Image: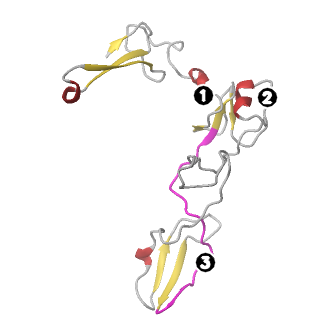
Amino acid sequence: MEKSNSPCSLDLILGKENLYKNSPINIGSITVGCAKCQDSQQDTPATQPTTTDGLKDLVGIPQPWPLADAPEGWLKCNGQAFDTAKYPQLAKLYPAGTLPDLRGEFIRGWDDGRGIDAKREIGSSQLGTHITGDNGLYPCVHGIGNIAECNVDSPDTASRSLYWIVAPNNERQTGPTYWGATRPRNIAFSYIVKAG
């Protein structure tokens, strides 16, 4: 790695011996905004990237944030309205002057004609579904006439187990009535956007 004039910029050179006969490929300079500077410059509050000020190009892009309150210059994606005159760059992405409400939501890649999740528009919402036949609960079915407990995660207001009786030509639930949407494991973060 070669250092350039910028204290936090690196020129990256990657060598591919087998493909390029020991000719390194220069992929250009990148700025490392989160890395510690590796030169004689001492770390001071002015040189340490401890704020989100270097993220000005990210205006309007939802970012996960580990705190309940958004930092200064950022807004929470909670469906709130914002002043389009005060934040013109943000208004280019959200012309109605309202941020999406991403509280408790997952962001999904737009289908864009692929056919996996057809007939969706960018920014549209979708209810959760339980995908039968792909639920991974088959190990809880034991045998004819036996009661099997299928441990599944569910909302805190509902029981966390489902009970089934398997009989010839007859499968029925004997336990709680909750059977909700498929949900992947997750960690709760706030979504925020750079306002301008």
**For the point 64% across and 28% down, which residue is it?**
59
Q: CA distance from mark 3 to mark 1?
A: 46 Å
- Say whether residue 155 is left or right of residue 17: right
Determine whether 20 is above or below 141 in the image.
Answer: above
Q: Amino acid at mark 1?
A: Leu
Task: Give the mark nearest the N terminus, 3 or 1.
Answer: 1
Left-right relation of 189 to 31? right
Q: Are marks 3 and 1 in contact (CB under 8 Å)?
A: no
In this figure, which residue is indicated by the disc labeled 3? 176
Q: Which residue is mark 1?
A: 58
Residue holding disc 2: 84
The residues bearing labels 1 and 2 have C-alpha atoms spaced at a distance of 17 Å
Point out the image quarter for the C terminus: top right
**Residue at point 65% right, 56% down?**
126
Which residue occupies 79% across, 37% down?
96
Element under label 1?
helix
Quadrant, the N terminus: top left
Q: Are marks 1 and 2 in contact (CB under 8 Å)?
A: no
> Which kind of residue does numbered mark 3 sit on?
Pro
Residue 183 in magenta stretch: yes
Measuring from the top left, give residue 105's x and y in whole percent: 63, 50
